[in-house]
Amino acid sequence: MKAVQVVAFGRPADVVKLNEVADTGSPGPNEVVVAVEAAPINNSDFMIMAGRYGYLPTPPATLGIEGVGRVIAAGSQVTNLKVGDRTLIPFTVPTWTERVRFTASWQRPLPEAANIKQLSMIGVNPATAYLLLTDFMKVPRGGWVIQNGANSATARAVIAVAKSLGVKTVNVVRREDVVDEVKSAGGDIVLVDGPDLAKRVAKETGGSPILLALDVVGGASTLNLMNCLAAKAVLVIYSAMSGQPFSGSALSVIFNEVSVRGFWLGHWGKTATDQTLATMYDHLVPMVASGAISAPVVGSYRLEDFSQAIAQASAFKGKVIFTPNQA
């Protein structure tokens, strides 16, 4: 069985290889074996390759943190899936390989008519978006959330999930040329970042209080978001695309009691119950199946073409998907 693995940490061209690995073997009583149909390349995969992620496997280790596949064998005690079902692969299972084996707990059969590539991306970005909007602050229906990096895959999912919850979005981007793109994705307000952001946001929202901010950029953009927040609001940092330390306002934290929190799906997954996972995916799967949540896909590759796939994905101009079992 083939798998794309990291064999050391460093430049992708130097440390990523296609290796022969042991097959999954037969499933245990509560397990399934799944043939991987689609598995995306995420920014976190690049961070793992570079040795800069929150969790680093011991090389050689198979890469990939999400995906979708077809059940080809099921244990005697599995009742929620059967052979032939398409299902999500848990984000704890490396997916850049031909087959995987895992305990079938919260998984459900996925709709057959849904786009396989879009389904393969539900485990990380849409899940993150859902949790950012539901775990930190209960924004009332008709209320506002503000986010930066609004043309990213997670931010697009935030826009869609927010709409499903009756919440409006202020979307901050770094370039004028992506404003129309984010508006087309459903963003209620789209603004280019800058030090006067708070004044422009207040004007566009009619001075409505904003209780939740989602920061994927870092640097000065974090401060710009914080300046837009109402008293007792929460700012959640879940990445740092700029590569810069975030800046903030001590006055907002002290006098307005604004809280700064961090979020990593890996931490959340350690304590998530099967019921919590099932509830989340029951909300998200229909949205992906209907096209309400989607991310642009710019390429798909076999495992054997991993070098080209990683090179295209490194441009961050859209999602690249591995299709290990596609002829």
Image: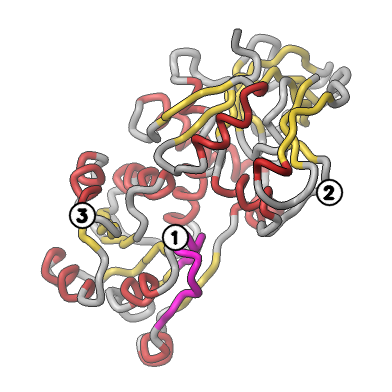
| Numbered range of the magenta stretch | 236-248
Amino acid carrying mark 2 in the image: Thr
**23 in relation to 46, above or below:** above
> As drawn, is 239 to the left or to the right of 82?
left
Residue 189: in magenta span = no
Q: Could you say which is closer to the camera, residue 324 or residue 132?
A: 324
Q: On the image, numbered disc 1 is attached to which residue?
A: 216
> Circle 1 sits in a helix, a strand or a loop, which is it?
loop
Q: Residue at x 62, y 14 (%)?
A: 85
Q: Mark 3 points at which residue?
A: 176
Residue 173 x, y percent position in the rendering: 29, 57
At 51% from the left and 23% from the top, the residue drawn is 300
Residue shown at 85% from the left, 21% from the top: 23
Q: Which residue position is annotated with label 2?
A: 58
Answer with the quarter of the image where residue 198 lies: bottom left
Category of crowding for the residue at label 2, using alpha-carbon neighbours closer than 10 angstroms: few (below 14), some (14–19), many (at least 20)? few
